[in-house]
Image (cartoon, helix red, strand yellow):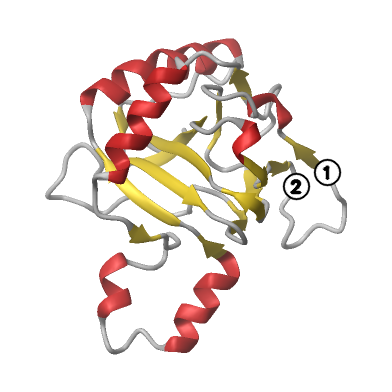
Amino acid sequence: MNLQNYYYYFQSVIPSRLCDDIVKHAKLQQEQIAVTGDVKINDLNKKNFSKEEAKNLKKIRNSNVVWLNDTWIYREIHPYILEANKLANWNFEWDWSESCQFTKYGTGQYYHWHTDSWEDMYNTPENINTHGKIRKLSVTCTLSDPSEYEGGELEFNFNNPQYSKRKNVKKCTEILPKGSLIVFPSFVWHRVRPVKSGTRYSLVIWNLGYPFK
């Protein structure tokens, strides 16, 4: 798919106090080890999930997450998703947001190259909000002040880094200020570089719609 814009950002639009409220609220919840799309969190507790598999997971992703479904969070961020979808000339049809993923990246933690979407649609007949849909738009909101950590940069690669020798990496410095957020198509490759010191907090939301026609 040819895009005029690979992402669209808004700087410092979420009030600092609200960012702090999200962080405080998330810290009161049960923290989990972050997994990738092909691993269910329950598998981590099963005997058939070997140490080798856990080690391989850490090669791709090393962070901790909390899942949030609070209406006040969606209410604050949804207007920016709608505006970015229009101003970036994507005009993707979407109608549902997944649970908010609050992510904590401590020293040495990271997320290697990946996309948020995959080929298969959600097969969830018990949930009409997700069944038959795909991830179309991803959102990342910066909850930490840049003075609180070093490293942890969000980077984009507008080619598939697994198969392309051409390097087209864009470091997304636009969302370094606290309360900034970025919206991008879920099929765009991106990564979070290792945090060198401190802790980086962010909020991610995936937004679903029926497959592209």
- Looking at the image, is 142 positioned above or below residue 158? above
Q: Nearer the viewer, residue 132 or 86?
A: 86
Percent of width and height locating residue 21: 33, 27
Residue 159, disc: 2
Q: Crowdedness of circle 1 by 10 Å Cα count: few (<14), some, many (20+)?
A: few
Say which residue appears at 45% left-offset and 61% top-offset. Answer: 36
Look at the numbered disc 2 and give the secondary structure of its residue.
loop
Which residue occupies the foreground of this view, 6 or 196? Answer: 196
Tally of marks:
2
Q: In the rendering, at what x and y percent does residue 79 appear?
A: 40, 12
- Give the secondary structure at mark 1: loop
Quarter of the image for the N terminus: give it.
top right
**Left/right of residue 70 with respect to residue 122 in the rendered view:** left
Residue 166 rendering spot, x and y as whole percentages: 87, 52
Q: Residue at x 83, y 43 (%)?
A: 168
Separation of marks 1 and 2 at Cα, in angstroms: 7 Å
Q: How many neighbours does mark 2 have within 10 angstroms: few (below 14), some (14-19), or many (20 or more)?
A: some
Residue kind at label 2, given as amino acid type: Asn
In the image as oriented, which residue stretches furthest toward the left?
126
Q: Are marks 1 and 2 in contact (CB under 8 Å)?
A: yes
In the rendering, which numbered label is found on residue 3? none
Vertical relation: 61 (above or below) 48: above
Amino acid type indicated by mark 1: Asn
Q: Which residue is mark 1?
A: 168
Sequence-earlier tag: 1 or 2: 2
Choose top left, top right, bottom left or bottom right for residue 20: top left
